[in-house]
Image: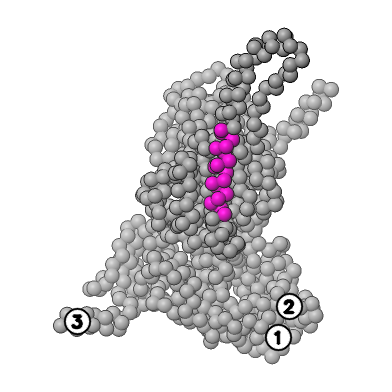
Amino acid sequence: MRGLQAWLLVCCAAALPAQDLVVRAGTIFTGESSALTPGAILITAGKIASIGKEVAQPEGATIIDLPQAFVAPGFIDCGTSLALKRGSAEDERAFLPNYRVAESLNLDDPAVLRHLQCGVTTFLSLPPDTNPLAGRAAVLSGSPRGGVNVLRADAGLVASLREGAWTRERSVSSLVGALEAFEGTELEGLRTGSSAGLLLLTSSGRELLAATKVQALAQAPAIWFLAADADECVLPAKETARAIVLGPVLPALHDRHLDLPRTIMAAGHRLAFQTTAPRHGGATLRLAAITATQHGVDRDDALRALTHTAAEVLGVADRVGSLASGKEGDLVIFDRHPLDARARLLYVVQDGALVDLTKEN
Amino acid sequence: MRFALALFALCVGMPFAGLVAQASPQLLLRGAEVIRSAGEAPIRADVLIENDTILEVGRDLTSASAVVRELNGQIIAPAFIDAGTPFLLDEAARRGAAGDLAAELLTSENAAGLKRMRSAGIGLACADLSPANDLRGPVTCTAITSGTSPTVKERLAGITFGLGTRLVNNAGRQSRSADAQNVQGAIAAARRYRKSIEKFEKDLKEFESKAGERAKEIEKDKTKERKIAPRRPRLEEAQECMLRVIDGALPLRIEANWREDIEAALDLATKANVKLVLLGAGEGALVSKKIADAGAIVLLPAPIRIESSPLEAPRRQAGLAATLVAAGVRVGFTTVGSRGFREDSLPLIAALHVGDGLDETSALRGLTLVAAEALGAGQRYGRVEKGRAALLQVVDKFELGGARPRCMVFGTEVVECGEGK
């Protein structure tokens, strides 16, 4: 009989993967509107059912009640190579406009759980930057039970202006090269916004100029990916950039690079960060924002760059990046403001379920 | 001529005019809240400094000759100490090209880096070669005063070796045992020097005691050969440093990350009966009790692994600093081996350890007193107290929130750090 009960329990647990969860905290940073101090969130079936000063507490719900804690939306990493299946798009310098990251995922990438354990619940996976037209990036989220969910299968066409992607004959600095790049590419979708547009990968001033040409040719809105340590960094014109993704931003960079986040924001650009994981781990995403705050960026603006702004940039703000009723139950709970370097990550909630922060993998 | 000299002095002095208060034999910091040591409550007091040393901490101090600075309730706390940084060294030395004595490799022109360190509250730092450098050696304790290069305080402040740090580069076990033999060899050599010095001293005594006798003999017999006085054995600085290590005056510093290397380091230090400072200690949580029993100090790099390197350490376990402190280990911090961080990141590294479970008082202690102890200078630095070195920061809050100090105090020199958050 006891065996049967245990079996039933297991069945119930499997059928109800996400139990109701109530989180009460001293501060809830919603991402969009002003913070709730204090506030409460009810997550049902993986989604936020209600949020406010107080919420209903269903029977049997898991309760997290931390009057001193600080809740924020799960962090969003705007540039990784996570969950990529190896081998499928590794032709160097090949035009692969129709390659889709979302269609060849490696669901068992252990780095995804490590990212989750750092509070990064959503990330953009870019195809290899060694191809000039590298294919379509995807917005993904790690699942607390393992595996990967696709939030947006076509998050934009990646055009890499990086050195490794181009040959001398087919230099992107010549218009011929750029024209060739777009031959046979469905540009209409990029322009009308059914995808996030062009994702332009650059890492130097020269590449940035080339990217300007490509952008002008495609006439599609673009997200500019800048390496934070570029030798010279000229910001793109505001009207050509939907957003700027910067990274990896590390404390070791030169002062003129560390001033970039503030400069980019001051120029009126939308700013988000990338880690380039697995090269750099998920913890460096928060470190980038902390570093930005030490170089003149307002703490809440930097936190927004990790959450709501990043979600807008990736075109998934209707589901993640902010805490509002109907959105995904993805959040992080720290013992103080997440961008205070001393903050301790207490819980990560993904799809309404708690992520095991101690599990080795 | 005099005018020309004065003009010259003016020109040289100009760049620092706004930065540095005029040097004076005495400095009186009045009306401060003094935090003598991390974790202690502040006391309302004045601090009187002469040359490099704190003369007095107390109420209503006066001095006829002192330059007075009113602090109006601002906090005086001990300056932070980086117990191991590669950033004060030449680029070439950092990459591993040069010799093995840190004092010889200090950069002469890094005013910007020193300013950044001061702005982070770091007043003292120990120059150490980075782990990428096969040749480790004696480390040097320096102050980050207003000059363009660090001021050497203790030319020898310990000696660094690596255990297992080259494991990934070279093939496996062989280099691990070679590393250990390297340390053992240095200790054995130091013992031999000690013996040869003892022998020299004995010989010298004997020589001197018989000097009169010999003089008489030579007087009698002019053909008799003159005896030459015994010579003191010559010591390289590295050997002299090792001597002071086996005498217990300076610590033996060993970088070790894998459990078996940490255990080997503890074993070496216990057998040789020397003070041990462990750098890295990636798997230290597995042997925290042993580290505590050996009385070793641990210096930790940042708890965030930025990028994998060929000198990969084992995966650092969550809560390492807190686990070590709970076991009774003294924990400090280092920018050696903290890839992705720079010279002014030390308080940030400590703060990230707080985020990883360490209590803030222990973190502040690790930045001050423990760091001083790791340099074999726990009696001189790390506390604001009569008789100790005047190495202070003036702050609004003594915590790891990223706030800049208002100014740093090096002896009687006050260096402004500027307003800032």
Q: Earlier in the sequence, mark 2 or mark 3?
A: 3
Q: Amino acid at mark 3?
A: Gly
Locate residue A69, reporting x and y percent.
37, 59
* Numbered circles on residues, count: 3
Decide if residue A112 is on the left or right side of residue B153.
left
**What kind of residue is marked 2?**
Trp
- Specify the amino acid type for callout 1: Phe
Report the chain holding disc 1: A
- The magenta segment: B178-195
Q: Nearer the viewer, residue A201 or A242?
A: A201
Q: Is residue A25 above or below residue B289?
A: below
Residue at the image point whose x is 59% and y is 83% from the top: A87
| Residue B193 is one of the magenta-drawn residues | yes
Q: Nearer the viewer, residue B321 or B117?
A: B321
| Residue topped by disc 2 | A166
Q: Mark number for residue A3? A: 3
Q: Specify whether B358 is left or right of B95.
A: left
Spatial distance from mark 2 to mark 3, Cα to Cα?
64 Å
Q: Look at the magenta stretch and give its main secondary structure.
A: helix
Kindly indicate the quadrant of the structure image that contains residue A159: bottom right
Secondary element type, mark 3:
helix
Give the left or right position of residue A216, taking residue A122 as reference: right
Point out the tag, 3 or 1, that comes first from the N-terminus.
Answer: 3
Residue A94: give x, y in percent of width and height: 69, 84
Q: CA distance from mark 3 to mark 1?
A: 63 Å
Q: Residue furthest bottom?
A: A184
Name the residue carrying label 1. A182
Residue B113 among those drawn in magenta: no
Q: Which label sits on residue A278?
A: none
Mark 2 neighbour class, 10 Å CA radius: few under 14, some 14 to 19, many 20 or more: many
Across and down, in percent, residue B359 comes to 39, 49
